[in-house]
């Protein structure tokens, strides 16, 4: 019986591996490694800056606004560069640059030093993700993209499951070593990107070559611009959770860094275990319906943080927030890839990624002010308001039919049904 289960699952794995090209699986592996190394640092970055500089929380959150602004400027340049010259080199330089900056962060002990490093860090970080998402759109057919982006999120969160759990213990036992390990992994990955990945930039037509290298065509896509504006509200909630929850939980309720690392690991493990099946299920519904429902789930998760005071309560809140994430993230990516002209994929993916960059600049600033001027739990009631507003926005977009928001076509449904039947036969 056990042997039969092993054989069937092995057959299912082989089917899954054959479903996507080798380039996709190289990107998958790269995401695992990159997110694991970054996971050693980013969940605890607010704490690092606080302890190394001793600055007030409202000043520290302003640094993340600065990082977001420089990231926004860099992303505006990255998209056109990748659409014109290719994805691979820019991705590799991003990884090498982030490695160098992490080494410098180890020696930063003033607010001014952190301001400079985070400003530059914001400029180099976005390129790897933008390039990888554009490459997936380049090499994976539209029918398979929602599931492909779900797998990329699984890769990302396999890394996130490992990184914060290890990082939480390193912070306590070997503080400075954390930076060096993360830097070394990013540098090695940058070299591997240069050596192993193929360039996937689609051939440009003569008309595309003559077209503007900027964002004029994209900004004329009114439906996409509105979609991004409403999505920003959702991203602000997840930013509040990942940037301010560690400080909120530690300073108000004594939840230590290693405990918070386990809370982040819950998020990552849920994505690893449930993202693919959740996306296969949500493909049956209209994309905006799925995203609106996910926004409401985010709102509920934020509210429960305000009501909690223990490690277990915050872990439960993370479960709720993650359910919303499972619904929103791959659906939004697949919808963006569907809307993007083939010669502007990096730009559309860049603008999509800007939602998190802007959220990372706006939400901590608002959260810091709510914390300092009203009360710590006001942060999470603010998240509740954002989630309800976003859900209403997506609902109104659907009512106005601003986007091609139909469920999968009849042909797509047949293909999905055949694919799912293969999976059932294999396992």
Image (spheres, rainbow, N blue to C red):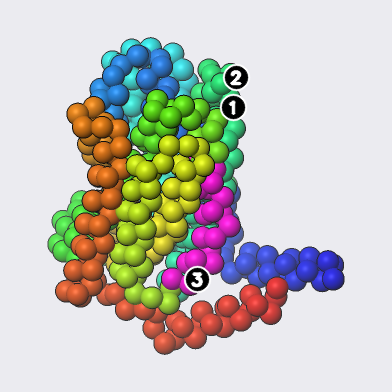
Question: Would residue 216 be found to the left or right of residue 49 on screen?
Answer: left
Q: Which residue is mark 2?
A: 173
The percent coordinates of residue 320 (x first, y second) are: 44, 54
User: CB atoms at circles 1 and 3 under 8 Å apart?
Assistant: no
Residue mark closest to the camera, 2 vs 3: 2
Residue 290, position as x, y percentages in the image: 36, 68
Rounded to the nearest angstrom, the CA distance separating label 2 from label 3 is 42 Å
| Magenta stretch bounds | 264-282
Give SS at disc 1: helix
Q: Is residue 284 above or below residue 354?
A: below
| Quadrant of the rendering where the C terminus is positioned | bottom right
Residue 53 lies in quadrant: top left
**Residue 190 visible in rendering:** no
Q: Is residue 277 above or below residue 76?
A: below
Quadrant the N terminus occupies:
bottom right
Q: Earlier in the sequence, mark 1 or mark 3?
A: 1
C-beta proximity under 8 Å, tags 2 and 3: no
Question: Judging from the image, what secondary structure is the residue with disc 2 in?
Answer: helix
The residue that label 3 is drawn on is: 280
Residue 400 visible: yes
Return the disc, 2 or 3, that comes first in the chain's sequence: 2
Q: Which residue is mark 1?
A: 169
Where is residue 11, by image quadrant?
bottom right
């Amino acid at each position: 019986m056990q042997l039969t289960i092993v054989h069937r699952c092995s057959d299912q794995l082989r089917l899954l591996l054959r479903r996507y090209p080798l380039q996709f699986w190289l990107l998958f592996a790269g995401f695992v490694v990159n997110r694991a190394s970054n996971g050693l640092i980013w969940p605890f970055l607010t704490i690092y800056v606080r302890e190394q500089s001793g600055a007030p929380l409202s000043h520290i959150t302003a640094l993340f606004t600065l990082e977001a602004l420089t990231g926004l400027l860099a992303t505006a340049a990255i998209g056109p560069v990748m659409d014109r010259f290719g994805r691979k080199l820019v991705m590799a330089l991003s990884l090498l640059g982030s490695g160098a900056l992490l080494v410098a962060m180890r020696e930063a002990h003033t607010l001014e030093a952190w301001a400079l490093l985070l400003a530059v860090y914001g400029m180099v970080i976005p390129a790897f993700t933008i390039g990888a998402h554009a490459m997936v759109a380049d090499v994976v057919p539209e029918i398979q993209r929602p599931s492909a982006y779900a797998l990329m999120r699984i890769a990302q969160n396999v890394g996130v499951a490992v990184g914060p759990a290890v990082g939480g213990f390193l912070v306590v036992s070997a503080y400075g070593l954390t930076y060096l390990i993360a830097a070394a992994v990013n540098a090695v990955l940058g070299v591997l990107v240069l050596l192993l990945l193929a360039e996937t930039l689609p051939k440009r037509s003569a008309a595309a070559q003559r077209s503007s290298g900027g964002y004029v065509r994209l900004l004329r896509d009114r439906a996409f611009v509105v979609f991004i504006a409403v999505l920003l509200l959702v991203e602000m909630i997840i930013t509040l959770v990942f940037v301010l929850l560690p400080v909120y939980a530690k300073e108000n309720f004594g939840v230590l860094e290693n405990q918070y690392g386990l809370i982040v690991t819950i998020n990552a493990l849920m994505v690893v275990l449930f993202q693919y099946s959740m996306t296969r299920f949500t493909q049956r519904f209209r994309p905006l319906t799925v995203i609106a429902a996910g926004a409401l789930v985010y709102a509920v998760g934020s509210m429960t943080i305000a009501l909690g005071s223990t490690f277990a309560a915050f872990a439960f809140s993370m479960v709720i927030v993650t359910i919303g994430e499972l619904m929103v993230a791959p659906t939004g990516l697949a919808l963006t890839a569907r809307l993007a002209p083939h010669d502007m994929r990096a730009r559309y993916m860049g603008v999509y990624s800007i939602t998190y960059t802007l959220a990372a600049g706006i939400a901590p600033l608002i959260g810091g002010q709510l914390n300092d001027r009203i009360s710590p739990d006001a942060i999470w009631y603010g998240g509740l308001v954002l989630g309800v507003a976003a859900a209403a926005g997506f609902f109104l977009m659907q009512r106005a039919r601003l986007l091609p928001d139909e469920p999968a076509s009849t042909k797509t449904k047949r293909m999905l049904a055949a694919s799912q039947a293969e999976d059932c036969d294999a396992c």
